[in-house]
Every structure is written in C-alpha cells, then in structure tokens.
C-alpha cells in the first residue's frame, strides 16, 4: 500500500472513531456503568458465586438487553476467577461469556452507549477462551478486538484500555510485544483520570494504581510507586478492589 494512501485511510478511520465517540451520550454511558458495576471486577469468589446465580435468574425472568450484558460480564468474571482454580465445575464460562456478548455486539440494534462495555468484555472473554483451550491464536484475535474497542471508545470509557492492560499483564513471556500494553494502557488511564476525575471510578483506579506500581518496582520509581499504592489503598476502604495487593506490594517495596 502506498504511504500516502495508508496515511489517508488512517486519518479517515481516526475521524470515524472520533465521530463514534462524540455520538455517545456520556450520561447514558455512566448510567450503564452504574448498572453493571456489581458484576464488573469481582474479586470475592463467594460473592461471585452468589452473584452468578442471581444474574442468571434475573436474565431468565427478564431477558432484556442490560440483563444479557450483565450475564455476559458475570460469565467473564466467573471464567477469570473460578475456571482456572476448578478442574471441571466452571470450565467453559469464557466461551459462554464471549457468545453472550457477541449476540449483543451489533451497533445497528444494541443501544450504542452499551457497546463500550460489550466490546471490551467480549475481547477479554476471547483471550480467556485462548487461555482455557490453549489455542493461542485467540489471543491475537482478542487484541485485534481490543484495538477496535480502544479506537472507538477509550475517550468515553476506561474499560477497553483497562481490560487490555490487565490481559497483557498476565500474558506469558512469548507475547512480549503485547505485554508492553500492560504499562501503556494503565499509564493512559492515569493520564485521562488526571484530566477528568470522573473518567473512572474509585474501584477501577485502585486497581490501576496498584498495577502501575507493580510494573515499576525498581528504585528509580520507588517514591512514585509508594504514592500510587497509598492512593490504591485509600480508594478501597472495603477491600473490594486493589487494596490488599497494594498493601502487600507496598510492604515488599519498603523492605527492599
């Protein structure tokens, strides 16, 4: 492809994506975020098991758009937190998540303000399918989906970068080109948050600050890491986000 043509296509895509973001009603995006918050980033496995049953029952009683999204996301959290510690009981939830969210992934019929959540968790679910089935090609496919979600929705939602960065952080060394997004995405969220304090909620930022410190443990970044770990701790008084890991990491850094 000629360089001039390639540049033109890139500029057109950027313009289209900017239009996509501008067309979303931010207040509706935030309303959906509030409605989905109890099924996103769940770390308590006892709570997760109860919430899984609750969300499945809700969807059976009312198979609405938002309840289907909640179901797809709680399946994602089940796959992430339970399938890898269970030999049989919770296998297959990654694919169930991907399938549920894929059925909703239709800009022509789905409420557009729900798409940042659907597209982000759909990409993450596909990466979990790859991890569970050991078919590493799915990881590459997941990152392509992340790239699309980020280009469309990162200006209005932290989720595309947050989930890509979280996936990248846990990849094996052979994916070193993709592991770099662990740092880039968390730094991007911190930068966006500094410009708009409403960009991400306290729970997410607790995870993000911990993740940044975890990625910058050498002495060069020691003071900044401690500062962000303190923020992660302060933002999570009930230990529902990054506080426990932040406290453990802070203790480790101070001992080194």
Image (cartoon, rainbow, N blue to C red):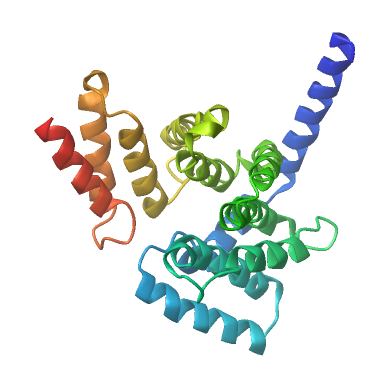
- In the displayed structure, 205 sits above or below 222; it is below
Left or right position of 55 against 86: right
Q: Position of residue 115 (x, y in %)?
A: 69, 55
Asked whether 233 or 121 is in front, the reply is 121
- In the displayed structure, 82 sits above or below 155; it is below
Left or right position of 51 against 210: right
Q: Position of residue 233 (x, y in %)?
A: 23, 49
Q: Quadrant of the C terminus?
A: top left
Asked whether 111 or 85 is in front, the reply is 85
Residue at position x 10%, y 34% in the image: 255
**Number of numbered labels in the structure image:** 0
Asked whether 223 or 198 is in front, the reply is 223
Residue at position x 51%, y 74% in the image: 88
Asked whether 92 or 15 is in front, the reply is 92
Q: Residue furthest bottom?
A: 61
Q: Position of residue 190 (x, y in %)?
A: 42, 34
Residue at position x 89%, y 15% in the image: 1
Residue at position x 63%, y 65% in the image: 97
Q: Position of residue 66 (x, y in %)?
A: 65, 71
């Amino acid at each position: 492809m000629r360089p001039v043509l390639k540049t033109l296509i890139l500029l057109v895509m950027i313009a289209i994506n900017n239009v996509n973001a501008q067309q979303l009603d931010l207040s509706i995006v935030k309303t959906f975020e509030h409605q989905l918050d109890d099924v996103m980033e769940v770390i308590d496995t006892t709570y997760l098991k109860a919430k899984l049953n609750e969300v499945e029952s809700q969807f059976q009683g009312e198979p609405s758009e938002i309840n289907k999204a909640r179901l797809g996301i709680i399946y994602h959290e089940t796959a992430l937190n339970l399938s890898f510690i269970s030999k049989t009981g919770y296998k297959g939830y990654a694919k169930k998540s991907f399938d549920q969210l894929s059925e909703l992934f239709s800009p022509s019929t789905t409420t557009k303000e729900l798409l940042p959540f659907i597209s982000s968790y759909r990409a993450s679910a596909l990466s979990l399918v790859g991890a569970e089935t050991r078919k590493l090609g799915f990881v590459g496919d997941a990152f392509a989906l992340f790239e699309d979600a980020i280009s469309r929705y990162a200006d209005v939602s932290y989720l595309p970068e947050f989930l890509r960065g979280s996936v990248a952080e846990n990849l094996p060394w052979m994916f070193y080109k993709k592991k770099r997004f662990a740092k880039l995405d968390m730094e991007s969220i911190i930068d966006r948050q500094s410009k708009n304090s409403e960009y991400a909620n306290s729970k997410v930022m607790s995870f993000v600050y911990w993740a940044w410190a975890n990625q910058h443990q050498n002495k060069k970044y020691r003071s900044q890491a401690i500062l962000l770990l303190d923020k992660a701790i302060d933002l999570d008084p009930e230990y529902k986000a990054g506080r426990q890991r932040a406290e453990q990491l802070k203790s480790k850094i101070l001992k080194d």
